[in-house]
C-alpha cells in the first residue's frame, strides 16, 4: 500500500507532489515536525489546491515575522503579497474562525470557575493584534456559567466612552448575576492605566448598586494579560463601595 502511494507520488508533477506530501505529513503526525512556513503554506493551498504557495508562505513569514503574526495579520495586508489573493485567504480565515468558535463553545459549556487564564485563552485570538481597543463584557448566571459575550465599545477606552448604566441594563436583559470585563491594549503592555482603574471602580460600584458581582477585569496584551481580580483590585473596589455605602447610610441616619 505504502509502495503504491510512493509510486503515485513520484508520478505527480513536482508542485503537486509537494502539496501531496504536506497533506500526508499532516494526516500522519499532525503539525509535529512542520516548519512555520509549511503550516502557512498548508493553509494557503486550502483555497487553491492546484497552486504552489511555498514562496508566498515564506514571504508572509518574513513580513509578519512569526506564525502568530501571519495568522493575526489583516487580510488586506496579506493580499499585498504577490500571489496571495482572496482564495488563498480562505484557509487562514477558516482556522481563525474555527478557533474562535471552538474556544467560545468550550467556555459557554462550562462554569467560569474564577479562572482568568481560561478567559484569556478564549478571547486572546479575538483581541490580539487589534489596532484599536475593544471592550467586551461576559455576562454570567448565578453558577458562573457564561450567558453571553458582547462587545460594548471600540476605540480609546476611557471613562467617557464606557457607560456603566448601559452595561447594567444589558446585564438585566440577560438576567445576569455577575460580570467579567475584558479589553485589549494595542501597545502589547497589559498594565492597567489610570483610566482603566477608574472605569473598573465605576463599574464595580454600579454593579454593587444593582446587586451584581464583578468577577474580573482582564486586560490583554501581547501574549500576556493583567487580571484585576488576581491582583486584588476588584476586592479593593468592593470594599471601597461598602465603606462608601456605610458612611452614606450613617450620614442619612444622622
Image: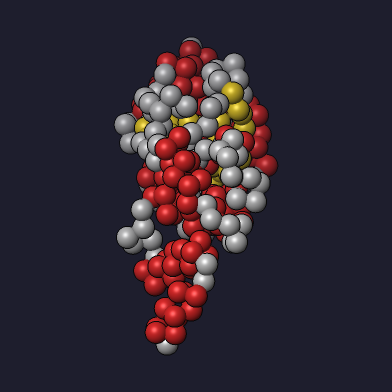
Instruction: Locate residue 117: give its quadrant.
Output: top left
Q: Residue 83: x percent and y percent? A: 59, 44
Does residue 253 show up? no
* Residue pictured at 44% horizontal, 54% vertical: 39
Residue at the image point whose x is 44% and y is 70% from the top = 24
For this view, does 165 lie left or right of residue 178? right
Name the quadrant containing residue 229: top left
Task: Locate residue 33 relative to residue 148 in the image: left or right.
Answer: left
- Nearest the viewer among 166 and 91 is 91
Is residue 161 placed above or below 85 in the rendered structure? above
Residue 71 image position (x, y, % from top left): 49, 44
Q: Which one is in front, 130 or 83? A: 83
Q: Is residue 230 left or right of residue 144?
A: left
Residue 122 image position (x, y, % from top left) = 47, 47
Measured from the top left, where is residue 172 in percent x and y? 64, 40
Along the line of sight, the residue nearer the viewer: 107 or 200: 107
Q: What residue is at 51 percent from the left and 61 percent from the top?
A: 15
Residue 193 appears in view: yes
Image quarter in which the N terminus is found: bottom left
Total residue callouts: 0
Question: Residue visible at 58% across and 57% down?
Answer: 51
Q: Residue furthest bottom?
A: 1
Residue 94 to residue 250: above or below: below
Amino acid at each position: 500500500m505504502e509502495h503504491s502511494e510512493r509510486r503515485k507520488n513520484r508520478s505527480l508533477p513536482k508542485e503537486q507532489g509537494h502539496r501531496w506530501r504536506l497533506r500526508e505529513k499532516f494526516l500522519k503526525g499532525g503539525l509535529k515536525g512542520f516548519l512555520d512556513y509549511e503550516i502557512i503554506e498548508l493553509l494557503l493551498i486550502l483555497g487553491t489546491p492546484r497552486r504552489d504557495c511555498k514562496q508566498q508562505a515564506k514571504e508572509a513569514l518574513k513580513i509578519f515575522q512569526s506564525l502568530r503574526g501571519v495568522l493575526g495579520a489583516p487580510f488586506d495586508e496579506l493580499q499585498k503579497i504577490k500571489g496571495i489573493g482572496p482564495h488563498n485567504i480562505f484557509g487562514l480565515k477558516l482556522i481563525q474562525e474555527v478557533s474562535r468558535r471552538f474556544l467560545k463553545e468550550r467556555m459557554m459549556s462550562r462554569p467560569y470557575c474564577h479562572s482568568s487564564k481560561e478567559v484569556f485563552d478564549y478571547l486572546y485570538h479575538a483581541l490580539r493584534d487589534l489596532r484599536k481597543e475593544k471592550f467586551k463584557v461576559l455576562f454570567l448566571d448565578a453558577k458562573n456559567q457564561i450567558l453571553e459575550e458582547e462587545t460594548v465599545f471600540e476605540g480609546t477606552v476611557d471613562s467617557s466612552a464606557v457607560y456603566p448604566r448601559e452595561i447594567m441594563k444589558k446585564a438585566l436583559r440577560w438576567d445576569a448575576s455577575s460580570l467579567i470585563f475584558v479589553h485589549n491594549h494595542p501597545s502589547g503592555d497589559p498594565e492597567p492605566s489610570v483610566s482603566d482603574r477608574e472605569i473598573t471602580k465605576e463599574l464595580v460600584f454600579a454593579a454593587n448598586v444593582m446587586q451584581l458581582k464583578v468577577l474580573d477585569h482582564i486586560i490583554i496584551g501581547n501574549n500576556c494579560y493583567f487580571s484585576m481580580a488576581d491582583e486584588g483590585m476588584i476586592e479593593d473596589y468592593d470594599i471601597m463601595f461598602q465603606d462608601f455605602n456605610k458612611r452614606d447610610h450613617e450620614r442619612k441616619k444622622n
